[in-house]
Amino acid sequence: MPKARTFTSEEIDRVRNMLKEAPEKPKVPAPLTAREMVTSIKAEINDLQKRGYTFEEIAEMIRSGFNLEHLGASTLKQYLTKKRTTSKAPKTTSSK
């Protein structure tokens, strides 16, 4: 059976210093979903609307820019609309 490798304190210090001096690794941004992408360009979409563009025209620009086939005006509106969560109190029936 082979003998286990041993390390001197100088070797350990050398490796420790090498690891400490390693440069920061760049973070790779996570890819966005279509909804997240639309949300991230919301300001630009709003600007186009102010300049008279319709949702269909904007959706067409996005489809051609990203090579998306299924992004329509209704989907674009849906992505830009914040979901409203309303908590309704449960209906109570009065028993008299």
Image (cartoon, helix red, strand yellow):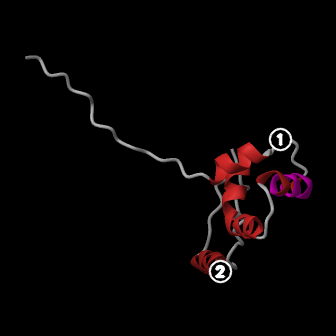
Crowding near the residue tagged with mark 1, few <14, some 14–19, many ≥20 C-alpha atoms within 10 Å? few
Which quadrant holds the C terminus?
top left
Front residue (pair 89, 8): 89
Identified by mark 1, the residue type is: His
52 vs 88, left or right, is: right
Res. 44 image quadrant: bottom right
Closer-to-camera residue (23/85): 85
Q: How many marks?
A: 2
Mark seen at residue 9: none
Q: Which label was assigned to residue 70?
A: 1
Q: Residues within 10 Å of mark 2 (few under 14, many from 20)?
A: few
Residue 7 in the image: x percent, y percent? 62, 69
In depth, the one of 25 and 20 nearer the eye is 25
Looking at the picture, does residue 53 appear above or below residue 16? above
Identify the amino acid type marked 2: Arg
Dividing the picture into quarters, in which one does residue 25 lie?
Answer: bottom right
Which residue occupies the extreme left position in the image?
Answer: 96
Q: Give the answer, above or below, for where 8 lies relative to 68.
A: below
C-alpha distance separating marks 2 and 1 = 56 Å
Q: Nearer the viewer, mark 2 or mark 1?
A: 1
- State which region is magenta: 58-65
